[in-house]
Image: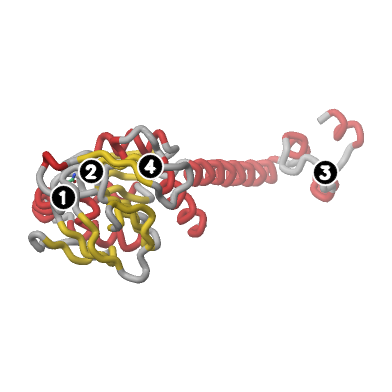
Amino acid sequence: MTKLKKKQESPKDVLLDPKGPYLGDDFLALCGERNRRFVERLRAEEEAVRQGEAQRRYRAEHPRIGVLALQGDYAAHASALEESGAIASEIRNPDQLNGVDALILPGGESTTMLKFLEKLRFFNSLEEFCERKPVFGTCAGAILLAREVLNPPQRSLGLLDAIIERNAYGRQINSTILEAETKLPGGPLEMVFIRAPRIVKIGPEVEALAFRDGFPTLVRQGSIMAATFHPELSSNRRVHQLFVDQVKAAASKLR
Ligand code: GLN
């Protein structure tokens, strides 16, 4: 400020000096009243852009991921997502989908979820969302995503090119926890199976990342992920981290 005054620089000189305080207080002090208002507006716009930029950067690092919260194990998923660097929110109606970058369809009872989805006229908006944004279905959520459901057949979103058989390992009593090698880094992965379905067939676009008795338990098809187990019930966050990283990658492609 003092330096400028001493040298009696004009606003034009300051603007032309690449190292000068462009739109800084010094420049403002040298402006006439009319120019001053103009410069103040430019500064406000500049500040808004800076803030928007910071928000975008924050959101890219911490994507907002919704968890369908109509029924089932949604609360544990929300904590697992937060522990993996995302901002989680529970989704109970179609409008809430507008505020999230991706979605988890939790485990629970797929028939009950279907009933709620139909009753709330939620099915079509969910389908539309999952076609555009990353989605991760676990257990009942994986059943909802599959192209075809067996035992018995039921309606599904049909976005994952897979045939899935409900309750394929028997009743609740046959639920189990297994450890197996997967294609994820970090050694054997714990998998919690609760009245789990079995992915009996996958299409050519689907990549299998983990297995139980030779059948895929964790699969990926573009921005769709599905697991027949409950990663939210294990303490290891590798599976949620993989999804959050995928959501970040998808968001950076859009920018
Ligand atoms: N058996 C349930 C169904 O068919 C799925 C179980 C689960 O999500 N843990 O929908």
Q: Is mark 2 within 8 Å of ligand 1?
A: yes
In the image, what residue type sits under mark 2? Phe
Q: Earlier in the sequence, mark 3 or mark 1?
A: 3
Q: Look at label 3 and name its amino acid.
A: Lys
CB under 8 Å between discs 4 and 1: no
Closer-to-camera residue (41/220): 220
Amino acid found under the numbered disc labelled 1: Tyr
The residue carrying mark 3 is 19
Quadrant placement of the N terminus? top right
The reply to whether discs 3 and 4 touch (Cβ–Cβ < 8 Å) is: no
Does the residue tagged 4 have its C-beta within 8 Å of any atom of ligand 1? no
Q: Pick the residue in front: 198 or 118.
A: 198
Residue 169's tag is 1
**Tag 2 residue:** 193
- Cα–Cα gap, marks 2 and 4: 13 Å
The residue singled out by tag 4 in the image is 189
Q: Is residue 28 above or below residue 228?
A: above
Q: Closer to the N terminus: mark 2 or mark 3?
A: 3
Residue 124 drawn above or below residue 3: below
Q: Residue at x 87, y 31 (%)?
A: 3
State the separation of the CA atoms marked 3 and 4. Answer: 55 Å
Residue 44 placement, left or right of 218: right
Q: Look at 20% across and 56% down and name the residue there.
A: 144
Q: Residue furthest top?
A: 2
Numbered disc 2: secondary structure: strand
Mark pair 3, 1: CA separation: 70 Å
Q: Are marks 2 and 4 in contact (CB under 8 Å)?
A: no
